[in-house]
Image: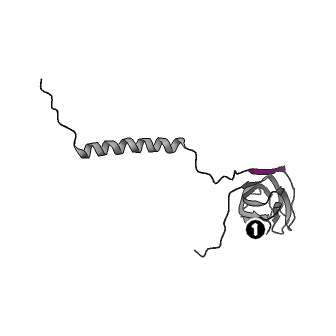
Amino acid sequence: MKYITQRPSGALVISLLAVVLASAGGAFAASSPPPTTGVPSRAYEVFRNSGPSNIPSTPTRVATLSGLAAGPYVITAKAYLDISSTHGNPRVLCQVNAAGDTDVAVAQGEQVSGAAMTVPMQVEVTHTFTSTGTVTLSCNKNGTSDQVNVNWAKIIATSVASETHRAVTG
């Protein structure tokens, strides 16, 4: 039996080398932690499982997260609104406020055969506190006699290395 003893071409050697390096690079990336800025993130949370009940048409404080150390944060807040309406189209507004940086969510539903609705609401904001900070979540109804109860409210503030927010036009 005769064996062919031909040397591999340069193109074959380069392509094999590329496959090996690509495989090793992916394994390295998968095993390496992401780069950090040296600032650990921390999350702070407050929650309120029930209440307030039958909120008025003026903003009503649902939850407060206070004592946040100075620094930048990403803040989310959520609540479930239980709405009983006799008017057909109830409207509820919830707002998160971090020292003047705010986000607002409006829920407007269509009542189906007088049944109560449960509507989830979520709001987010970023803010850098220059001193100890406080975040509030408040909600109010549209001024009708609809019954609105707020449940399962939560505010989470996560400290981050930095935050930037800016208005855009498109």
Q: Identify the residue under disc 1.
A: 101
In the picture, the quarter occupied by the C terminus is bottom right
Figure check: 158 above or below 146: above
Give the residue at x 87% y 59%.
54
Residue nearest the viewer, comparing 102 with 95: 102
Measured as percent of width and height from the top left, residue 7 is found at 20, 38
Q: Which residue reaches farthest bottom?
A: 169
In the image: residue 42, left or right of residue 36: right
Give the residue at x 17% y 32%.
5
Q: Residues within 10 Å of mark 1 (few under 14, many from 20)?
A: some
Asked if the stretch drawn in magenta spans residue 46, the answer is yes
Residue 161 sits in quarter? bottom right
Asked if the stretch drawn in magenta spans residue 23, the answer is no
Measured as percent of width and height from the top left, residue 27 is found at 47, 41
Residue 91 sits in quarter? bottom right
Task: Name the secondary structure under disc 1.
Answer: strand
Q: Which residue reaches farthest left?
A: 2
Residue nearest the viewer, comparing 92 with 74: 74
Q: Which residues are magenta?
A: 33-53
Residue 112 in view, yes or no: no
In the picture, the quarter occupied by the N terminus is top left
Residue 78 in view, yes or no: yes
Figure check: 117 above or below 13: below
Give the amino acid type for the residue marked by disc 1 in the picture. Answer: Asp
Residue nearest the viewer, comparing 16 with 80: 16
Name the magenta segment's main secondary structure: loop
Give the residue at x 37% y 41%.
20
